[in-house]
Image (tube, rainbow, N blue to C red):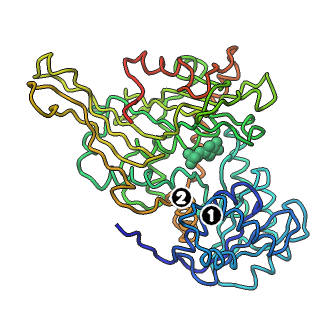
Amino acid sequence: MVARVIEVELFDLVVFGATGDLAGRKLIPALYQRCAGGQIPHGARVIGVSRRAMDDVAFRAMAHAALLAHVPAADRDEAAMARFLARLTYVAADADAEPGWPALAARLAEAEGRIRVFYLATAPELFGPICARLAAHGLNAGDARVVVEKPIGKSLDSARAVNDAVGAAFPEDRVYRIDHYLGKETVQNLMALRFANALFEPLWNAAHVDHVQITVAETLGVEGRAGYYDTAGALRDMVQNHLLQLLCLTAMEPPVSLAADAVRDEKLKVLKALVPITERNAATATVRGQYRAGASAGGPVGGYLDELGDPASRTETFVALKAEIANWRWAGVPFYLRTGKRLANRVSEIVIAFRAIPHSVFDAGAGPIAANRLVIRLQPDESVKLWLMIKDPGPGGMRLGHAPLNMGFAETFGVRNPDAYERLLMDVVRGNQTLFMRRDEVEAAWSWIDPILDAWAGAAEPPKPYTSGTWGPSAAIALVERDGRSWNEDG
Ligand code: BG6
């Protein structure tokens, strides 16, 4: 299959925090890929902004190094990289001080009448000050858009404050809140699978689904981010956004269209239907863990507390929890969520575990009959597998086996799997908010998360230690086994 490239309109993209980690690791490589792929029109500009004094040449050299470090060698083409780097310019400006801002305004004024995007790849404390200065210079005018990324607050109250500050300069229909999981190909495939096939939707409910599992497991530790991470923890860093977004797309009613608000309205209803987890049930419905020394990716690794240098930290690097959605479609169907750092494997997947057959016509010699499972794997190898019972081939009577109908996207379609940021950046330019979070969604997610955080803060017990390279604390296994179920191990 051949990817279809549709050129976007002419734009100026201003990246605040242009010398930072997100810009170097994700934004610059994503823009290069789309530029090399022919989607970015001639004349479009990327304007890097940060506090550091630097000229265009130095910024381009920095961006070049980022491409060498983060774009796969097979996708790097000298001529395409040179064409891309020529679009980059740089302005030094500080969110908290006026110098530099007139220069930015002048740079933008060189090319009026094109789409303007401001990407705030900065610490969230700067979202408000940057938006205020953009407004003071009139740069928020017309249909200029702003892109912000998590953490959007640390709680409902602080999220509201961030949203208010951004909202003071940009109306909601020009605010793009990124959750990069929504840009992953297989997450979009979830919508294709559910709403472009007649097969699954009639079964997609409590009458036929026994439970759902959502796992986002990483082998990495907190790397160089322990400072940030210790103020967040896995519940804020991963569950409040990525895992709840996956849950919403899995559980939502069919939207009337893919228009942004049609999809976001349905996701919001799911968030509002989540049964609260409070101090009353947090001990039985949640498990939090913290990694200790162990082995990961074949080598020994240290523990979280050593990396952080603070033996007293109670920040969780692992969460497993049992969520319930109180509506007609899902009442009584547990959604088990788990995510953690330094786990045994890097794997992200959504498992729809169907109910067992009501009656077996086979005799005991046929072997056990496993219930069907649909496994939607986001990474590392994107695939959709439907696990079915079959007759084991060959002689030996009626013996049953368990085998997947397997669609691996790389082999099936043979196209490069784009990074989530590529799609999302182009959607901002196109003005399509479907894959971005609306304010009320973010706040509804915090409303559900806050009581869990409160319950944990009031609990005497610290997070349970787990050895790096395992699947987390044994209590996370008990969380599902207590209900007579097990985490998916079928791959
Ligand atoms: C980020 C988190 O949002 O997602 C990180 O802050 C995490 O802690 C990352 O490692 C995982 O993203 P991906 O795309 O590698 O699964």
**Helix, strand or loop under label 1:** helix
Disc 2: CA contacts within 10 A as few (<14), some (14-19) or many (>=20): some
Q: Which residue is drawn at 70% across and 14% down?
A: 460
Image side of residue 310 versus residue 429, left or right? right
Mark 1 CB lies closer than 8 A to ligand 1: no
**Helix, strand or loop under label 2:** loop
Mark 1 or mark 2, earlier in chain: 1
Vertical order, 214 against 8 (above or below) = above
Relative depth, front residue between 394 and 106: 394
Q: Position of residue 316 (x, y in %)?
A: 66, 28
Q: Position of residue 238 (x, y in %)?
A: 59, 40
Quadrant containing ligand 1 reads top right
The disc label shown at residue 29, or none: 1
Image side of residue 372 versus residue 449, left or right? left
| Residue 449 seen by the camera | no
Q: Position of residue 78 (x, y in %)?
A: 62, 75
Image side of residue 335 versus residue 83, left or right? left
Image side of residue 218 versus residue 215, left or right? right
Q: Position of residue 239 (x, y in %)?
A: 57, 37
